[in-house]
Amino acid sequence: MIPAIINQGGGKWAFENLAYILSESLWVDIQEDFGDLNYILCVDNDEINKIASFIPIDSIKIAADKRKIEERFNAFGVPRPRTIIPSNAKEIEAILSENDQLKWILKYPTGCGAINHRFIENVSQIPKGWPKPFLLQEFIELQRPEVYRLYCVDGEIFGFNARRFKDKNIKNPWVAHAQGAIYEYGESPDKEAVEVATKALISTGLYYSFGIVDLLKSQDKKWYALEVGTDGIYNYVDRDIENETLINEINERLAKAFWKRIGSPPWGINWKYRNQKYSTNLLDSGCASIDIKDGRS
Ligand SMILES: Nc1ncnc2c1ncn2[C@@H]1O[C@H](COP(=O)(O)OP(=O)(O)O)[C@@H](O)[C@H]1O
Ligand SMILES: [Mg+2]
């Protein structure tokens, strides 16, 4: 079996650093041609569904569209903020008037980095050209805006962190690294958080390869899955996470999981990076922002 990291086509610049990191940790070369097992980054291929991908292509597509995530979360009963997918403004109007005690967000369905989400009280606030169907979600009010993340490789959940704005006075409800929030470590997930994350990853088909789950903890201590994320095509999981131990753990776990499907790994007994010259300075902020053109998802 020939393994390959695939990074090709017009958008490949956005994945170049990650491709390099992966080639060093997986001991696999970056190629234009598909192998027998592929770690897909940027790809320009209509036949993509037929390619043997470490992360299922379907799951990559689901993770890139919050409406698809909602369909899966709904089908599997994943605890999440109340979410509705209205097909037109009239339906939104009805939802807003029937549930006017709730605060609603109109979410940009294919974005990342908390760009474009907005509160909505009235259908006149829907911007022109907004992607349809819409995605409406109940806003979970928090004392201090924060979002938690769990990582998963090959059916094992690990690596808990929280993102918050360093300045406690910042009340921006959209917490994202891209908005200036920083990763914080030291807390541990409780059983319920891990259960919600596991369900979210199983529902979206990411549990057995690689995915993350973003979670909110409500003021009454309930855990909700916000979304899942993974690497490939449209986006990638942020590696600029201010924690070298966790970065190394992600890389080692990915390498072992990838080679489990191929055969004996090339690094010998203990995993290490292929070249000593590997440097985590390469890590950049993880929102590839490959803007998904309508229809591409
Ligand atoms: N339903 C919600 N209730 C409270 N805060 C939310 C909710 N949805 C999103 N947020 C906040 O907005 C941020 C970005 O939303 P998210 O759904 O993760 O989209 P993105 O793909 O832009 O990261 C989250 O990290 C969280 O801080
Ligand atoms: Mg997010």
Image: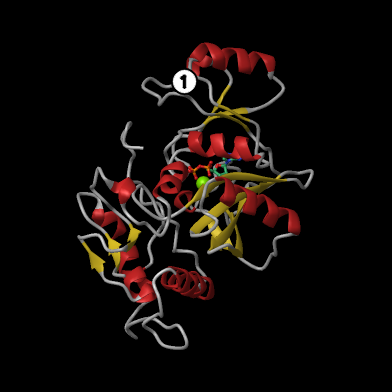
Query: Relative to residue 103, is residue 8 drawn left or right?
Result: left
Q: Residue 284 is drawn in which quadrant?
A: bottom left
Q: Secondary structure at mark 1?
A: loop
Residue 231 x, y percent position in the rendering: 41, 55
* Most foreground residue, 49 or 107: 49
Query: Relative to residue 194, is residue 84 drawn left or right?
Result: left
Q: Residue 198 is drawn in which quadrant?
A: bottom right
Q: Give the residue at x 61% y 12%.
A: 94
Badge 1 amino acid: Ile
Residue 233 x, y percent position in the rendering: 33, 49
* Most foreground residue, 169 or 225: 225
Residue 19 x, y percent position in the rendering: 31, 65
Q: Which residue is mark 1?
A: 126
Q: Is residue 288 above or below residue 65?
A: below
Q: Give the residue at x 20% y 60%.
A: 33
Q: Residue 116 is drawn in which quadrant?
A: top left
Q: Is residue 101 above or below residue 164?
A: above
**Which quadrant is the C terminus positioned in?**
top left
Q: Give the residue at x 47% y 87%.
A: 270
Dot 1 surroundings within 10 Å: few (below 14), some, or many (20 or more)? Answer: some
